[in-house]
Amino acid sequence: MASERTTEILTRLRGAGDAVGIAAIGDLADAAETLGDDVAAYARLSLTDRMRMAVLCQWPANPDTAAAVRAMHAQIGNPIQAQTLPALLDRPAKVRFVELETTRHGATPPTVSFHMVGERALADDIALLSRTTIFQPSAGREVTALSELLGRSSSDLFIDRAEPNAANQWLFRFRRGNGAGGELEETVRLALALMERLHVTAEQRLLFERLHPRLARGETVLVSIVSVFDCALPWVTVQYPDLPWELLVPTMIELYGNEWGERLGAFAGAFDAEASSAFELTFRDESPVRSRVSIDSIAP
């Protein structure tokens, strides 16, 4: 039986989803019950511009809970992730997380992502993916070449993401500083070079160049390369930590319209959040830029 705190978090999740009009929020909350009391210790709740919600927690310590997550994952109908999952869970990492997310049109089961935190040689993760029968060597070579544009040969976070009836995605995230002494300018220069190589639109490159100094505020960010089985996608995601609402809300309104002020107010209010824990922008080869706002709920 779920603890009182787990029940409270999932009740708040349902309330937030209902308040902002998320399809199938009840299905997501029901699926999140599978995660057991790992949700009570730490949960990251996210809202995307596409009106999806997600809940993330540490990979279940309870073997029965872990088995339930595997069973849920098996329903997705994504044969690639099924091939990589055993090796993925044996992959060295400082900490592992699992995330469940609503999918388009409220389809079930949810999207399932596995997050592996900790620096690791990119070549080792490419080798892990190459054990599948579908991941192509050309994709590995392209990801490696793109990471070199960021001056990195190892990633700091690796994500395996499976959405029902869609191509599996792998995200390689790299830390980039934005401090004094030219560090900010260097991050902007390298990220723009990466975006240009991936054919991100000129409009969105200009948007990044304008927003980044304001959102980074001297903090370290995570820059992501996203790959499918045969190539890197024309996307670059930048994740900004710990943004105050007075900075984030005007940014979302600028990008998507006035209704986002009310939506973020309902989302923040549901979890009594004084600030966002993370804000992601994904710059792409088509409009609009995608976004994700996250709030952390940590046990007292």
Image (cartoon, grey):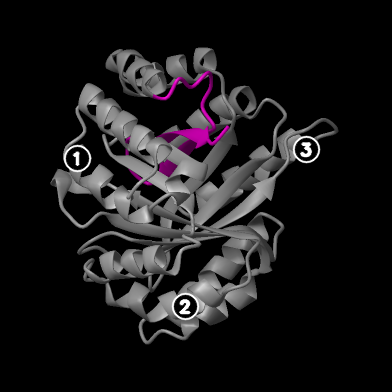
Are there few (<14), some (14-19), or many (20+) residues within 10 Å of tag 1? Answer: some
The numbered dot on residue 194 is none
- Verify CB contact (< 8 Å) between mark 1 and mark 2: no
Report if residue 298 lies within the magenta region.
yes
Q: Position of residue 248 (x, y in %)?
A: 49, 20
Camera-side residue: 162 or 59? 59
Camera-side residue: 243 or 25? 25
The numbered dot on residue 138 is 2
What residue type is disc 3 on? Glu
Position of 223 compared to 17: left or right? right
Q: Position of residue 232 (x, y in %)?
A: 44, 63
Position of 149 compared to 254: left or right? right
Report if residue 49 lies within the magenta region.
no
Residue drawn 69% across the image and 45% down it: 176
What residue type is disc 1 on? Gly
Residue drawn 49% across the image and 34% down it: 297
User: In terms of sequence position, does the residue under pointer 2 or pointer 3 come before the other?
Assistant: 2
The numbered dot on residue 183 is 3
Q: For mark 1, what is the residue?
A: 26
Task: Kindly tell me whether residue 291 is visible in this rendering.
Answer: no
Task: Kindly tell me whether residue 11 is visible in this rendering.
Answer: yes
The magenta region covers 271-300
